[in-house]
Amino acid sequence: MNDDDRLKELGIWSLEERRNHADLLEVFKMKTGHSAIAYDKFFEVEKHRATIGHSWKIHKQRCHLDPRTYFTGRVVDRWNKLERQDVDCRSVNEFKKKKLDELRWVF
């Protein structure tokens, strides 16, 4: 039995899944003003928005020596893959329960 099978059997998430969950939740909180961290301090909304997906796509910045870029570089692709209904939730709890738990990390 491999690690993935054990995690499934126990009904728990891997460290990577927990990190993905926490990252996306933090971006959602920043976007909706439920975080002490200002969204515009970390992210820049994509200027060339495609019609596919949602309107909160994040512009992927080049890596710098700034420690913030580690978090932003890690979360941008996953955030941009979310659907419109995923980022347009009305509350943090709705995003957390209905969206993140449903996704179960296809990324």
Image (tube, rainbow, N blue to C red):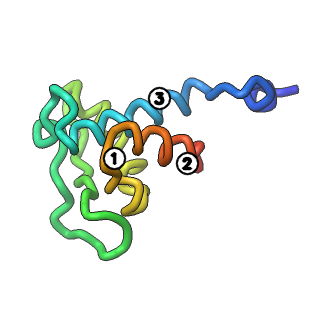
Which residue is pictured at 34% across the width and 38% down the height? Answer: 92
Query: At label 2, which amino acid type do we have?
Result: Leu
Distance from Cα at disc 1 to Cα at disc 2: 16 Å
Tell me: 37 left or right of 3. left
Which residue is pictured at 16% across the width and 50% down the height? Answer: 44
Q: Are marks 1 and 2 in contact (CB under 8 Å)?
A: no
The residue furthest bottom is 51
The residue furthest right is 1
Residue 43 place in picture, x, y as percent: 18, 44
Along the line of sight, which residue is nearer the eye, 83 or 70? 83
Q: Indicate which disc, 1 or 2, sits on the residue closer to the N terminus.
A: 1
Distance from Cα at disc 2 to Cα at disc 3: 14 Å
Residue 17 place in picture, x, y as percent: 55, 33
Q: Relative to 19, say whether 87 is above or below.
A: below
Distance from Cα at disc 3 to Cα at disc 1: 13 Å
Q: Indicate which disc, 2 or 3, sits on the residue closer to the N terminus.
A: 3
Assign a secondary structure to mark 2: helix
Which of pointers 2 and 3 indicates the residue nearer the eye?
Answer: 2
Residue 85 place in picture, x, y as percent: 40, 60
Which quadrant, please, contains the N terminus? Answer: top right
The residue carrying mark 2 is 103
Which residue is pictured at 71% across the width and 28% down the height? Answer: 11
Asked which quadrant contains residue 33, the reply is: top left
Local crowd size for mark 1, using a 10 Å CA cut-off: few (<14), some (14–19), many (≥20): some
Local crowd size for mark 2, using a 10 Å CA cut-off: few (<14), some (14–19), many (≥20): few
| Picture disc at residue 76 | 1
| Picture disc at residue 19 | 3
Query: At label 1, which amino acid type do we have?
Result: Val
| Picture disc at residue 40 | none
